[in-house]
Image (tube, rainbow, N blue to C red):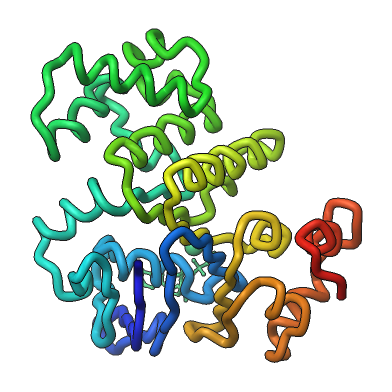
Amino acid sequence: MLTVSGLTTEFRARGGRFTAIEDIGFEVPQGIAVGLVGETGSGKSVTIRSILGLLPPPGRVVAGHAEFDGLDLCRATRPQLRSVRGRRIGFVAQNPFGSLNPVLSIEKQFANVVRAHRGMSRSAVRELALERLASVHVRGPERVLRGYAHELSGGMAQRVVIALAMLHDPPLVIADEPTTALDVTVQRQILDLIAAQVAAGNRSLLLVTHDLAVVAQYCQQVVVMRAGHVVESGPVADVFGAPEHPYTKQLLAAVPPAPWSLASSLHEAGVDR
Ligand SMILES: Nc1ncnc2c1ncn2[C@@H]1O[C@H](COP(=O)(O)OP(=O)(O)OP(=O)(O)O)[C@@H](O)[C@H]1O
Ligand SMILES: [Mg+2]
């Protein structure tokens, strides 16, 4: 579904260049959830943004490929990327308020996403938006549609972002720490919601998180990053059950003890360490 190889991204500024990620390679197979983990600054977001063509300047992909739908996203044109992001890859970022437009009503934002990719009447857009808001369990969807992002709680705003990201039924969903900006009490609900939407459409998921228990619960495969490199990857049961790289061992050792921990998630997944 998505094949990343040799991906290398630099930030260039006056006086030098900084290689944020180097020679990154992994696959997200059809219908599989892949967790991308690593400590802060390891290059998870730069990897995702390199794939999606959303690197902030002065970031630049200097080598490698991200093959998706027969297209190398690293060499795609802006219109091609925009089309892929809207229709084929649903992206959920960390901060929902950064994804929503503060000066447009939620209804207008649904209309913009729909119209960018297919023609539809205003009432048809409204009906579709209401149906999708209901599917992500947004309470009072009529009122939400008339309103603006700032009137929503963080959890509700992220539900709206998820509904927008799923609007065109994309076969691949990429979520970059989709819950870290949210209240702890709603984090699991949002992850459950993403997992349910992914499972319902037999989609693939690339989930960035620094929480190994989340990977154990929601993903079948894991890619471990450190300092801009992939240090280990494979099925969750193999990597967490018998980690090969010292860094992965260290990450696993840092997980707090049961009952809320990785150990219990792994046990539920049928892995005993
Ligand atoms: N706009 C930028 N300009 C310069 N350097 C950047 C920029 N964005 C990221 N970097 C650098 O690239 C490296 C990787 O950052 P990245 O944001 O991908 O980390 P991350 O793994 O997503 O961390 P976190 O878990 O904190 O989100 C870091 O050293 C960071 O300082
Ligand atoms: Mg990040």
Classify 174 as above or below 143.
Answer: below
Residue 167 % position (x, y): 31, 36
Classify 231 as above or below 258.
Answer: below
Q: Left of 22 or right of it: where is 106?
A: left
Residue 175 % position (x, y): 46, 53
Quadrant (top left/top right/bottom left/bottom right) for the N terminus: bottom left
Q: Left of 154 or right of it: where is 48?
A: left
| Nearest to the observer: residue 219 or residue 39 | 219
Q: Going 47% across and 10% down the picture, which residue do you hit?
A: 140
Q: How many marks?
A: 0
**Looking at this rendering, what residue extends furthest in the right direction?**
258
Q: Going 90% across and 62% down the picture, which residue do you hit?
A: 257
Q: Left of 114 or right of it: where is 92?
A: right
Classify 13 as above or below 112.
Answer: below
Q: Going 47% across and 56% down the picture, which residue do you hit?
A: 176
Residue 236 % position (x, y): 66, 71
Asked which quadrant contains residue 131, the reply is top left
Asked which quadrant contains residue 45, the reply is bottom left
Q: Going 38% across and 25% down the picture, which residue do you hit?
A: 132
Quadrant (top left/top right/bottom left/bottom right) for the C terminus: bottom right
